[in-house]
Structures are given as structure tokens and as C-alpha cells.
Amino acid sequence: MPLANPNYVFRALADPTRRAIFEQLTRHGEQTVHALTRHAGVSQPAVSKHLTVLKRAKLVRHRRDGRETHYHAQPDALAPMINWLDHYGAFWRERFDRLEDLLQRMEP
């Protein structure tokens, strides 16, 4: 499966309702739009729109079963975000290590 576009992942998870939907699917497994709507605190059309954004970011997948659509989380799609955070985590750790060295050299 190709990696998700990092911009789509960040944009999708920037919204608290989408984060909550993604977390709901991650913690409780596959669910229908109706089940997700009960927990989301927004209307069913709004949940559907949020799911579209999450699908575009490859954070969720769906399958049809008759008239119901079932959604499940794709946590592997977080890889671009994790890679970005790892990169900048290392960057800042190095900067703070340099600062600590400088401050130790400055002590009387």
C-alpha cells in the first residue's frame, strides 16, 4: 500500500471531530456510519464528510455490506506523520544537547 500524502494526514487529523472518529475506529474496530454518528456529536452528513477526508488521507477504509458501509482505521497511514515527528524530534534533541554543552562551558 503506498504511503499516504503527509499533507492529507496532517490536515485530516487537524480537525478534532476527525481525530475522534479515527480514535473511535482505532480503539473499537470496524463501525458503520450510524454507530460513528452516535459517538461523534455531529450529524450523519457531517460524519460522512469527515470520513471522506479520512479516506482521502488513507486513514480509514470502507467496505459495503448491503445498504451499510463499514469503516475501519488504517493506523499504518500515520507513517508520514511519525516520520516527520521523528525527524524534528532528532533535530530538537541535537539543538538542546548543544545548548546544554554551551551552558556547561559557561558555568563559572
Image (spheres, grey):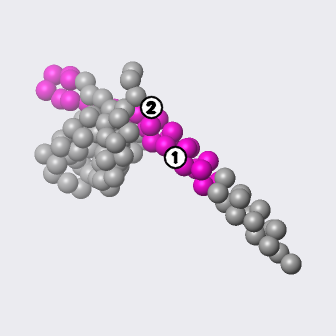
Q: Position of residue 81 (x, y in %)?
A: 45, 42
The quarter of the rendered structure image containing the C terminus is bottom right
Nearer mark to the viewer, of 1 and 2: 1
* Residue 78 is one of the magenta-drawn residues: yes
Can you identify the residue that label 2 sits on? 76
Q: Which mark is residue 85?
A: 1
Identity of the residue drawn at 31% across and 36% down: 57
Q: CA distance from mark 1 to mark 2?
A: 15 Å
Amino acid type for the residue under numbered disc 2: Asp
Amino acid type for the residue under numbered disc 1: Leu
Q: Secondary structure at mark 2?
A: helix
Identity of the residue drawn at 82% across and 75% down: 107
83 to the left or right of 106: left
Stretch of the chain drawn in magenta: 64-93
Q: Quadrant of residue 1?
A: top left
Earlier residue among tags 1 and 2: 2
- Which residue is outermost to the bottom? 108
Q: Position of residue 71 (x, y in %)?
A: 28, 32
Q: Secondary structure at mark 1?
A: helix
Question: Is any part of residue 90 visible from this angle?
Answer: yes
Q: Position of residue 16 (x, y in %)?
A: 32, 55
Q: Is residue 98 above or below residue 11?
A: below
Pick the residue in front: 45 or 8.
8
- Chief secondary structure of the magenta span? helix
